Image (cartoon, helix red, strand yellow):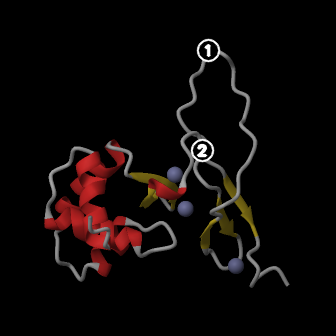
Amino acid sequence: MNFDMNSSKKDILKNAHLRCTQARLDILDVLQHSDMALTQKQITDLLKDKYDKVTIYRTLKAFVHTDIVHKAYCRGKIWHFELANRCGKEQCHPHFSCQLCGKNFCLVGTSYPAVQIPKNFESLRQKVLIEGFCPDCKN
Ligand SMILES: [Zn+2]
Ligand SMILES: [Zn+2]
Ligand SMILES: [Zn+2]
C-alpha cells in the first residue's frame, strides 16, 4: 500500500463516497497544507484561479456535507473552511481571534468541557470562539 499524500486524499474522497476529481484533490491539498482555516477566496487564490468560483463553492459544499471539511468560523460574513481531521467527533478545536491584529488561530490540541444544553435540544458538534490578544499583541 502506498500512503503518500496523493493516495490519502483519494482515500478521503473514497470514504466520503465522493467521486475523485482533480478539483477535489487540489482543494483538499490546499486545505491539508494550511494550518489555519481558509476562505473560498483564499482557496481560489492559492490555486492561482485554476478553478472558477462555482466549482470551488460546490466542492466546499460537498466537503462540508460529507463532513470532510468544517466551517470553522465566520468573519465579516465570510466563512472560513478547514479540514475536519483536527476536530473531535463532538467538538471542534477552539478558534482564537486576536482583537488587535485580527489574526485567527486554530487552538489544536486543546479541549473544553461539554456545554450543558436543555434536554429537548440535540447537539451535533460544539464550536468555541475565543476573543483576546495573541502572543504578539499581548504586550
Ligand atoms: Zn471542526
Ligand atoms: Zn494579535
Ligand atoms: Zn481551526
Residue beneath the point at 60% across and 44% down: 91
Looking at the rendered structure, which numbered label has been put on residue 42?
none
Residue with the most extreme right position: 139
Give how far across and how far down residue 70 sits, in percent: 44, 52
The residue drawn where x is 62% and y is 63% is 108
- Quarter of the rendered structure image containing ligand 3: bottom right
46 to 116, vertically: above or below? below
Residue 117: where, in percent of width, then height? 69, 26
Dot placed on the residue nearer the N-terminal end, 1 or 2: 2
Question: As drawn, which residue projects farthest toward the front?
Answer: 1
Amino acid type of disc 1? Asn
Q: In this rendering, would 31 be left or right of 75?
A: left
Is residue 51 placed above or below 95 in the rendered structure? below
Disc 1 element = loop
The residue located at (75%, 41%) in the rendering is: 113
Instruction: Locate the N terminus and report the quarter of the image it occupies.
Output: bottom left
Q: Report the residue marked by disc 1.
A: 120
In the picture, the quarter occupied by the C terminus is bottom right
Q: Residues within 10 Å of mark 1 (few under 14, many from 20)?
A: few
Q: Residue at x 37, y 74 (%)?
A: 42
Residue that carries the numbered disc 2 in the rendered image? 91
Give the foreground label among 1 and 2.
Answer: 2
Image coordinates of residue 98 in percent, x first then y, are 69, 71
Residue 67 image-quadrant placement: top left
Left/right of residue 45 with respect to residue 74 in the rendered view: left
Residue type at numbered disc 2: Gln
Does label 1 point to a residue whose CB lies under 8 Å from ligand 1?
no
Residue in the foreground of this view, choosing between 40 and 26: 26
